[in-house]
Image (tube, rainbow, N blue to C red):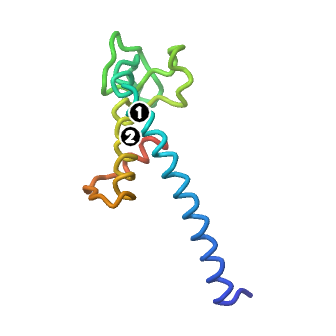
């Protein structure tokens, strides 16, 4: 049977692991934001071909021109490497989330926002 001390050590190790994971996530976020800032990916994402969604959530008819309220069409060859259909605005919200993470760790003020909703939209 584990003692209170055993449980304290287990929790301390879990905390160390979580901090290492958070630092790795922070470094990944910095890399993504730096790459985003060097290019015009937001504009490019907005101009990707899109498609309406069917009632079952699958991709429906392709849009004649990009519709920002419809997800990026992953059936288009040039966009097929995208893991799943997602709104360009969700991608840009993910960048903003990472920028606010940089602010937080840089000791800057971070305004309140529903960051969990951004994560859930992008994580699927």
39 or 111: nearer the viewer: 39
Between marks 1 and 2, how big is the CA–CA gap? 8 Å
Question: How many callouts does the rendering have?
Answer: 2
Residue that carries the numbered disc 2 in the rendered image: 95
Q: What SS does tag 2 mark?
A: helix
Residue at position x 26%, y 59% in the image: 109
Q: Which labelled disc corresponds to residue 10?
A: none
Relative side of 83 to 96, left or right: right
Q: Residue 120: where, in percent of width, then height? A: 43, 47
Name the image quarter holding residue 46.
Answer: top left
Residue at position x 45%, y 20% in the image: 73
Residue that carries the numbered disc 1 in the rendered image: 36
Asked if the residue at tag 2 contacts the one at tag 1, i.e. Cβ–Cβ closer than 8 Å, the answer is yes
Residue at position x 34%, y 53% in the image: 103
Residue at position x 40%, y 35% in the image: 91
Relative side of 74 to 98, left or right: right
Q: Earlier in the sequence, mark 1 or mark 2?
A: 1
Relative side of 74 to 105, left or right: right
Q: Residue 21: where, in percent of width, then height? A: 57, 58
Q: Which of marks 1 and 2 is in front?
A: 1
Indicate whether 24 appears above or below 94.
below
Q: Judge the density around disc 1: few (<14), some (14-19), many (≥20) Cα neighbours within 10 Å.
A: some
Q: Residue 28: where, in percent of width, then height? A: 52, 46
């Amino acid at each position: 049977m584990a003692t209170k001390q055993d449980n304290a050590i287990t929790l301390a190790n879990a905390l160390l692991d979580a901090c290492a994971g958070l630092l790795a996530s922070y470094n990944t976020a910095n890399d993504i934001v730096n790459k985003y800032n060097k290019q015009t990916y937001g504009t490019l994402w907005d101009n990707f071909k899109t498609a309406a969604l069917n009632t079952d959530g699958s991709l429906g008819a392709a849009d004649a021109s990009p519709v920002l309220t419809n997800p990026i069409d992953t059936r288009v060859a040039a966009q097929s490497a995208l893991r799943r259909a997602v709104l360009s605005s969700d991608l840009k919200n993910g960048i903003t989330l990472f920028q606010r993470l940089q602010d937080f760790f840089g000791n800057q003020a971070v305004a309140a926002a529903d960051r969990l909703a951004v994560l859930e939209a992008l994580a699927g």
